[in-house]
Amino acid sequence: MARIGIQAAGFRFVAETNPEAPQTVEAFLKLLPYRQKIIHVRWSGEGCWIPLGEFQLGVGFENHTSHPSVGDILFYPGGYSETEIILAYGSCSFASKMGQLAGNHFLTIVEGKENLRALGKKVLWEGAQDISFELL
């Protein structure tokens, strides 16, 4: 498992790759270091997401779920909704205006989890925040 450093809105997290999503992990690692904006979800509950529009990572569904646990990071390859990355900071049921979605669980936050709720609240009340991912 690779370890990924994540910095978002002044918080630092460490995530580990999920061996049950090898294609998603391999494709995402090629993007590192990766910088983007994170915003609060609209339909999924307590989560933040990175909207990616028509971006294609080149992977399909693997190890996909609609119900990420706190600290799980999913990649949705697109189809019914735009491509995106979603990070659960609390109760989350992954959905869009089209209905329930499922994303590949490819990263799990293993350090800094105690700051996820604070990240979620900051993104909710202060708007889009910078986020970066780098290989440790």
Image (spheres, rainbow, N blue to C red):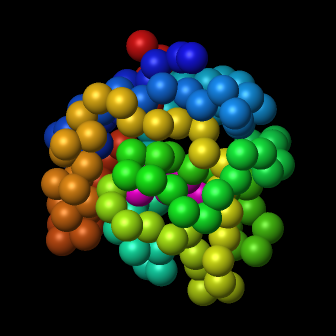
Residue 46 image point, x, y percent? 35, 68
Residue at 64% in and 58% down: 65
Q: Nearer the viewer, residue 27 or 2?
A: 2
Residue 55 drawn above or below residue 6:
below
Residue 108 drawn above or below residue 74:
above
Residue at 40% in and 74% down: 45
| In-image side of 76 versus 70 (left or right) | right
Q: Nearer the viewer, residue 87 or 114?
A: 114
Q: Quadrant of the C terminus?
A: top left
Residue 55 image point, x, y percent? 70, 53
Find the magenta span and give its range.
84-88
Q: Nearer the viewer, residue 127 or 75?
A: 75
Residue 124, picture quadrant: bottom left
Q: Main secondary structure of the magenta part?
A: strand
Label total for image = 0
Residue 19, picture quadrant: top right
Q: Would residue 42 be counted in the magenta stretch?
A: no
Residue 14 image point, x, y percent? 35, 27
Residue at 37% in and 67% down: 91
| In-image side of 84 versus 113 (left or right) | right
Q: Would residue 86 be counted in the magenta stretch?
A: yes
Residue 93 drawn above or below residue 74:
below
Residue 114 image point, x, y percent? 19, 43
| In-image side of 88 versus 56 (left or right) | left
